[in-house]
Image (spheres, rainbow, N blue to C red):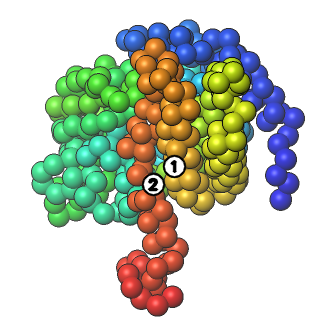
Amino acid sequence: MDAAFTAEQDEIRRTLRDLLTKHGGPGEVRAAVRTTEGHDPALWHRLAQELGLPGLAVAEEYGGAGCTATELALACEETGRALLPSPLLATAVLAAPLITALGTPEQRAELLPRIADGTLTAALAVPGGSMAAALGLTADNRAAAWAGGGRAGGIQAHPDGGGGGGWRLYGEADRVLDGHSAGLLLVAAHAGGYPRSRTLLFLVSAEAEGLARTRLTSMDETRPLARIELRDAPARLLGADDGTDVCGALADTGSRAAAVLAAEAVGAAAGALERTVAYVKEREQFGRAIGSFQAVKHRLADLYVRVEAARSAAYYAAWDPAAGPLALAQALEAARIVAGEAVQLHGGIGFTWEHEAHLYVKRAAADELLFGPVHRLRDHAAGRAGLFGAVTADGPVRGAAV
């Protein structure tokens, strides 16, 4: 295994960092989150048209670059460093792989080129507000609890009766990432009622009748969330209802998404650490820079080790997605600790609204709420590996000798 990055991968990182340094500073981020879209449409257009970010991992036959998860992880590490609000995560990391895995050839040909060139954004809506469980990161997503199975709860799907193969959806989903502005929604819903309940994914247009979208007040404004309400909204089935393993596709997407999310969290942690190091070199106390004090040096050294360890785990997970959930747990933990220490080491200014330190704290906390928490990521990974018990056909047995 050659762990070195190629010249092309290094160029992706360098070009994106240069662009975000000029157009993705704290002032631009604060302005972007106050827009209707929750991000800067002009900057998103540049990222899509000039750098091709949303199409990095889309196959070349659909207008993408045909790259791997590694390139996408490197790109998200840089967007995480700047805390950039953008539809990249919801569209390219969550929605596009599901369309690729489950969509019919006609659906892939219709949707993926528009995603690759940035003209179409998408969002994954799951009932119950548990994105981590739906993606198989913190629990077995084949259990019906996350999707509200049965006769009531969650989102229910039924044929529209028109004979054209259409469907109608009824229900709601909370905490949908970029759900208020996405042009296309991928909605997880139950079909078949109680006796033959099964989870399927459906395509819902942003202009569909019976669809109501409300942007929610979120802890981290750079992660805009929405509530999706469906009242007999027309929808198209993603793929075919032929026994396709939808939960398996969600879990596979979750493992790959975890690797990319880990890289993004590492970028945020690194950004917070870099700003802190720059500050302690300038801030003076008792006639000398506070960064020259041994206690401060030790704290910064510990943070550096955490960031580098999390970065190594994220890069490995980009190569082997099976390690994604554990890498995500390590990266989220590193981001939380580094962001908290950054506020402390900035002193009084770190607690002010005007300073950007609190933005990193909110990103770390919000990501853990949305894709964690850390202890559940690790517990589920340990259970799947049989670390604390024997593994049977029904799953790990707690307390059994290994």
| Circle 1 crowding by C-alpha within 10 Å: few under 14, some 14–19, many from 20 | many
Q: Measure the C-alpha gap from mark 1 to mark 2.
A: 7 Å
Q: Nearer the viewer, residue 311 or 9?
A: 311
Q: Are marks 1 and 2 in contact (CB under 8 Å)?
A: yes
Q: Residue at x 73, y 33 (%)?
A: 292
Reading the image, the residue beneath label 2 is 374
Residue 52 visible (yes or no) = no
Reading the image, the residue beneath label 1 is 333
Task: Where is residue 179? Give x, y as percent.
Answer: 36, 28
Q: Residue at x 42, y 50 (%)?
A: 372
Q: Residue at x 43, y 59 (%)?
A: 375
Q: Nearer the viewer, residue 57 or 137?
A: 137
* Image side of residue 211 versus residue 238, left or right: left
Name above or below for residue 301 compared with residue 58. below
Location of the N terminus by quadrant is bottom right
Task: Where is residue 145? Give x, y as percent.
Answer: 25, 58
The amino acid sitting under disc 1 is Glu
The amino acid sitting under disc 2 is Val
Q: Quadrant of residue 242?
A: bottom left
* Image side of residue 389 versus residue 195, left or right: right
Residue extending furthest front?
286
Task: Where is residue 177? Give x, y as percent.
Answer: 39, 32
Of the numbered discs 1 and 2, the one sitting upstream in the chain is 1
Q: Secondary structure at mark 2?
A: helix
Task: Where is residue 130? Give x, y as percent.
Answer: 32, 47
